[in-house]
Amino acid sequence: MKLLVVICLFVLSISIFNPCFSQKQVEISGVKYILHTVIKSETVFNICQKYKVSQKDIMQANPGLPGILKAGSTVKIPVATVSQETEKPEPAGEAQPATEEEFYYHKVAPKQTLFSIAKQYGITANDLIRNNPELTNGIVPGQVLKIPVSITNVDAQKANDIASTQIDVSEYSVHPVVSGETLYSLEQRYGISHDEMMKFNPALQNGLKAGMKLKIPAKKAVASVEPVTVPGNVVLSKYKVEKGETLFSLAARFGVDVAEIKKVNPSLFSRSLETGEIISIPQQSSAKNQDSGKTEPSQIATVTEPNSEPPQDCDPINSKKQKYKAALLLPLYLAGNENPEPTSIDKALLLSKISITKSVVANPMDTAVVLNGANIDQRALGFLEFYEGALLALDSVQRRGMNVELYVFDSSNQKMINALLQLDEFRDLNLIIGPVYPEIQETVASFAAKNRIPMVSPLASAGNLEQNNSWYFKVNPSREYQIEQTASYAAENLRNKNFILLQLSGNSSSADAQLARLCKEKLAITSKKNLFHEYNIQQQGINSLKPLLADSAENIFIIPTDNEAQVSVAVTNLTALAEHYNIVLLGTQALPKLKSIQTENYHRIRLRYLSPYLIDYNRHLVRRFVGQYRQMYSAEPTQFSFQGFDVTYYFLSALYRYGKDFRNCLSDYPMELTQMDFNFEKVAPMGGYTNHNLFVTGYERNFDVLNLGTFGGHSLNQKK
């Protein structure tokens, strides 16, 4: 079947209207609109404030409106939603001067991202980009950004403070809002009506934002009533988190798993507990409560979760005559797309095919590559390898009879994304894979949800768009999830071993440091022998460590730092001990990437870590893929190549088998892939899906790298 591969090099065209019609009213399809002409530096937010309408109303009336407005363009304002306040004349003699938008100024520090800065100021990434157009080219340390200060927000906060003095909130609970939470989910969580929530928090009239601290009425947060049973025969009660408590201590106290607590508190998938917040506790077992001698929480309240979507009929469909369209959005960094300007669409270029054959540039000092005679940005190489794997997956599903066209678009920046979403072809898609970067996924995710198109995040583990978007799939689980599961693996499968935590100075927030803390906490709960030692190898040396080691049993070491120099010294010492003792190093997938440590040392100390990736070159499927890749591209596949094949093959196959809405069918659709093992689970009643399967990778002394099974949730499936 003929393959259509399309590279998008076109940008957004904006209709220009005569400014003299800035306040003209028109009627379109029975709806009256005010035509507003955009002035220089005006934003969507400014227009919303001027006409007292919501951003949702503006976007619905102007589908595909770009984040950065062009002076002279026209925006339709739905008359029915315009507040009457805009029609009231100003009192005589009290004309108000035009307000000028105010800004904070923020200097970007090293390692800060678009999302971290937006969260710091309680705004969205789109707000930042609208006020700092240069961010479409990336963010760099030292850059000074304008942070919009909303006068309305200030007034609302004052109103919030005034309301606080008029309402009896002497014992109200404070809930810190995190990314992904919605007003509806919070009202359901605390059993509070919308009117009550707005009464206690007037600032919500401007929308819910991450970082806000909401006041929850005490009668709702801590009312003393009997627990209730919700669908699924799960009894829920409310509990106020006290200082020092963690998910694991609460799980042990109430006899439930951490995963069960997170399931009824979806926001905890992406953050830690906050002291003073109210969470739901599923009471499915009282055994541990009785053993611990601790009583049930006295501060409880009824809670009901929104009904999840009804199960879909997952019988395979007859789709042989169906034609499917899928889009692959990759940052290809093509010339001319760095800062696109409005221009006409070149249809001939749009429909032209490309060749993926790569060759080194003649100049030996140049590290770029040539694609169809054009230099390719070095940053795009990994994504081109992903694309190569995707093409092999496409060929595989086509050989099975699937009639599918794959459109490939350059999605290097937000402007290109805004341009793509204007295309009629996008609304006809059955699947979207990408974009890659979390900071530019939001607009595509919103578009996909609105048009009921499955969207896949193929590489990034950051971002929380799956929390409130039921059409969103995250392939790579978050770093926090991987750390938690590694600690759970240790507690469940290594709990009676001899553990030694090497005390080293370093970044206390690193993944390795977090793993050490979680292992210590979980093992204290599950280990009967409680063989957990802490040893400062820097101060006491290697010889004083020997009395702590078991002569015959396994000695499990944890190095709680990401400092490469310290890790290197510790690994060297453990390698020496491994000549006489049974040593195992438990760590994260970051350890094998440290360049100063020889891989053979990891084999001698039998490194163990959990990761969503594992390539076993002894498997038939992997060997076949490598052979096809070599034949097609005259090169060796990389991890990007394997990932491109796995993601594309899995989701195109699901689309072919179940149709466009395959969301509820993936749990019954296991599939052998080259380097991943997908197990997608819904993260929230109204949310999307995240892959929860991790491989347990083991380095052995005979220099084998083994798949010791998959671990997801709280169960280990041993490799057969």
Image (cartoon, helix red, strand yellow):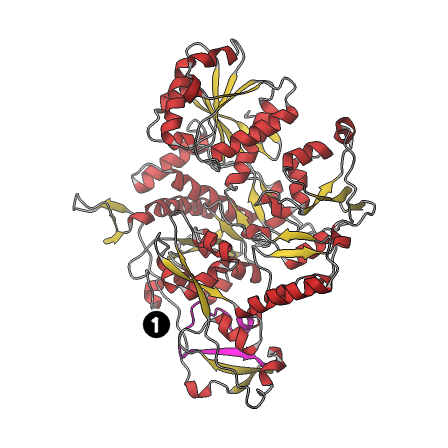
Q: Is residue 173 left or right of residue 536?
A: right
* Displayed quadrant of residue 294: top right
Please tell me whether mark 1 sits on a helix, a strand or a loop. loop
From this viewpoint, which residue is outermost toward the bottom?
Answer: 92
**Segment colored magenta:** 58-79
Q: Position of residue 484 (x, y in %)?
A: 56, 35
Q: Is residue 681 left or right of residue 439?
A: right
Pick whichever, 419 or 461, lies toward us. 461
Pick whichever, 540 or 193, lies toward us. 540
Q: Quadrant of the C terminus?
A: top right
Q: Position of residue 252 (x, y in %)?
A: 69, 31
| Residue 418 visible in the current orientation | no
Q: Position of residue 536 (x, y in %)?
A: 46, 21
Q: Residue at x 46, y 46 (%)?
A: 460
| Residue 188 visible in the current orientation | yes
Q: How many marks?
A: 1
What is the crowding at mark 1: few (fewer than 14 residues within 10 Å), some, or many (at least 20)? Answer: few
From this viewpoint, which residue is outermost toward the left?
Answer: 363
Magenta run includes residue 75 = yes
Magenta run includes residue 469 = no
Q: Residue at x 65, y 25 (%)?
A: 526
Q: Amino acid at mark 1?
A: Ser
Q: Residue at x 42, y 85 (%)?
A: 19
Q: Which residue is mark 1?
A: 344
Pick whichever, 697 or 317, lies toward us. 697
State whether residue 248 is above or below residue 470.
above
Q: Position of residue 719 (x, y in %)?
A: 54, 26
